[in-house]
Amino acid sequence: MRRWIVRAGVAILLFLVIALASIFVFLRRSLPVIDGETSVQGISAPVEIVRDADAIPHVLASTKLDALFGLGYVHAQDRLWQMEFQRRIGHGRLSEIFGAATIPQDRFLRTVGFGRAARTAWAATPAWAQEQINAYVAGINAFITAHRGSRLPPEFVLLRFEPEPWTGPDVIVWVKMMAWDLSANYSFELLRHDLIRAVGAEKMAQLLPPYATDGLSIVPSWPGESGGSSGSGGWWVGQVGRF
């Protein structure tokens, strides 16, 4: 009886070792390859990516477009799952991979329309800027093309899907999400706007005093407008129609 217990213990231990080794090899396959050379299409000359002692990548290229291509490639190397998750948030496409649990979030995100705003902004983006963003996107897609299945981050394997090719609006949509995240005072800006239409600027200022003239600001006031900063009631109310 004791012999069978020993044999069972050895078998279980061997199974655990094999399982752990398999998991280790599987996870290692998705780590970025930081040594050697790889061939890609979409660049005009070789691009060198050097990682320093802190693993921070430095992209060395002969042209700006090639450098942006390399930047997209290393971003995909290090953060492809994060990038995929963020663009799905922006476009309201979480439920395609997470199921019914994220339908309320997708409904909200699509109602606000971050994806629509990104597509509209992309259509209005100057050609020179589109060219640079497309170079960055091409780098992302070059990495995706060369990495399928288990070579993708483990989240893709666990959720059983592969990322679609990236586009310009996919880059812009997260800019829209960041703008939303940083616009915590938007309700007060709209309130000021509505009050000035209803009771006039003078009475509005009695209800909602303007931002301090010596307050911190990153945007100067427009010539001839009241207030000394971007946070002042006069500047924001006067500029609402220009956004």
Image: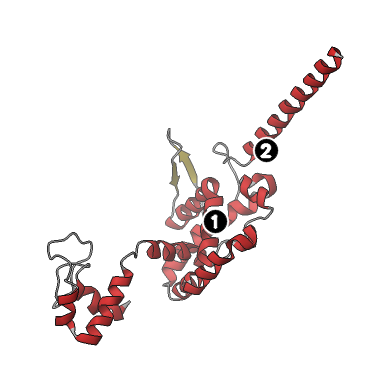
Residue depicted at 30% across the width and 81% down the height: 241
Above or below for 117 versus 13: below
Task: Give percent across and percent down for residue 31.
Answer: 58, 40
Assess disc 2: are there few (<14), some (14-19) or many (≥20) residues with their C-alpha within 10 Å of its C-alpha: some
Task: Give percent across and percent down for residue 185.
Answer: 30, 67
Name the image quarter holding residue 100: bottom right
Q: Nearer the viewer, mark 1 or mark 2?
A: 1
Residue that label 1 marks? 85
Task: Give percent across and percent down for residue 111.
Answer: 50, 74
Residue that label 2 marks? 26
Above or below for 50 versus 208: above
User: The N terminus appears in which quarter of the rendering?
Assistant: top right
Q: Secondary structure at mark 1?
A: helix
Q: Secondary structure at mark 2?
A: helix
Residue depicted at 48% across the width and 54% down the height: 66
- Of 34 and 183, which appears nearest the observer? 183
Looking at the image, which residue sits at the far top? 2
Task: Give percent across and percent down for residue 92.
Answer: 55, 66
- Of 71 and 209, which appears nearest the observer? 209
Q: Hey, what amino acid is under mark 2?
A: Phe
1 or 2: tag closer to the N-terminus:
2
Q: Hey, what amino acid is under mark 1?
A: Phe
Residue depicted at 35% across the width and 61% down the height: 182
Name the image quarter holding residue 193: bottom left
For the image, the number of numbered tags is: 2
Q: From where the camera sits, is residue 50 visible? A: yes
Which label sits on residue 49? Answer: none
